[in-house]
Image (cartoon, rainbow, N blue to C red):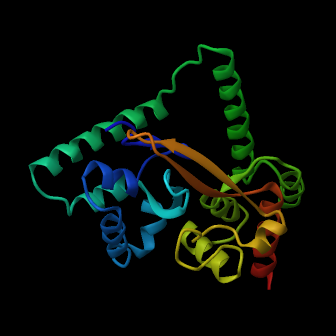
Amino acid sequence: MENLVVMKNQQAVTTSLQVAEVFQKSHRHVLEAIDSLKEGVAENWADLFYEDTYVHPQNKQTYRQIIMTRDGFTLLAMGFTGSKAMQFKLQYIQAFNEMENKLAYPRIPTTLPEALRLAADLEEEKAQLKIENEEMKPKALFADSVAASHTTILIGDLAKVLRGNGVNIGQNRLFEVLRKEGFLISRKGTSYNMPTQKAMDLGLFRVKETSITHSDGHVTVNKTPKVTGKGQQYFVNRFLARSDN
């Protein structure tokens, strides 16, 4: 029952694999239950669930899993009934609360490695805020500075950057456009929404891998596409050129 909720990309989340384990359900059935929700929440899907993969500890094969936010889990768990399921739901709610409290009130570092990690995180946050603040620099200077930056951002944050530069687009629509134009993989499966080889060759994305150790000792690997500095400049210029036509 450990690690019900983990921190990923500064957000409290859980996984379909962990839900299957805790609620003693087949992982395949949990995935089917999540997929069945997709049509009803199509517009908000990317805010609730997103595709990911994990490596099975025995056969070392890569399989599909889904990461979900608190709201995504709540929507899924509505279909779980019974007194035992209710206990598990309450445990999840408590776990989400504890993780979100940690995010809101981070622990003061007590060791040198923790202090260095905190300093690096703060620098990354400052760089990202600088990118998102449309009033700090003109668009041309923004593009030049971002191209040389080593800071990577989430695709959802790229949508914010684009809006800050006058492009009217949200996260879900951006994912759709990037899939349609061949920058993200559109084929359903473990690689869904991962960068295409073309996008990787252009240096537009990096894939961040995060290992999560579960209570039974098996390890899953979460993969998250992040937009490089070069990618941020590329997509800002691409969308601005399109809006000018």
Give me the residue at 26% from left, 59% from top.
25
Q: Give residue 224's quadrant in the image.
A: bottom right
Q: Quadrant of the C terminus?
A: bottom right
Give me the residue at 36% from left, 41% from top.
96
| In front of the other: 33 or 228 | 33
151 over 43 or under it: above or below = above
Locate residue 230, reporting x and y percent.
Answer: 84, 59
Q: Name the residue furthest left.
A: 83
Q: Name the residue furthest front.
A: 59
Q: Name the residue furthest top.
A: 110
Locate residue 187, reporting x and y percent.
Answer: 58, 80
Horizontal relation, residue 60 to residue 236: left or right: left
| In front of the other: 70 or 65 | 65
| In front of the other: 205 or 154 | 205
Q: Quadrant of the N terminus?
A: top left
38 over 1 or under it: above or below = below
Locate residue 12, reporting x and y percent.
Answer: 44, 44
Q: Give residue 40's quadrant in the image.
A: bottom left
Give me the residue at 44% from left, 62% from top.
49
Horizontal relation, residue 189 to residue 13: left or right: right
Q: How many marks?
A: 0
Horizontal relation, residue 9 to residue 91: left or right: right
Horizontal relation, residue 234 to residue 99: left or right: right
Locate residue 130, reporting x and y percent.
Answer: 74, 45
| In front of the other: 127 or 13 | 13
21 over 204 or under it: above or below = above
45 over 83 or under it: above or below = below
Give me the residue at 60% from left, 79% from top.
186
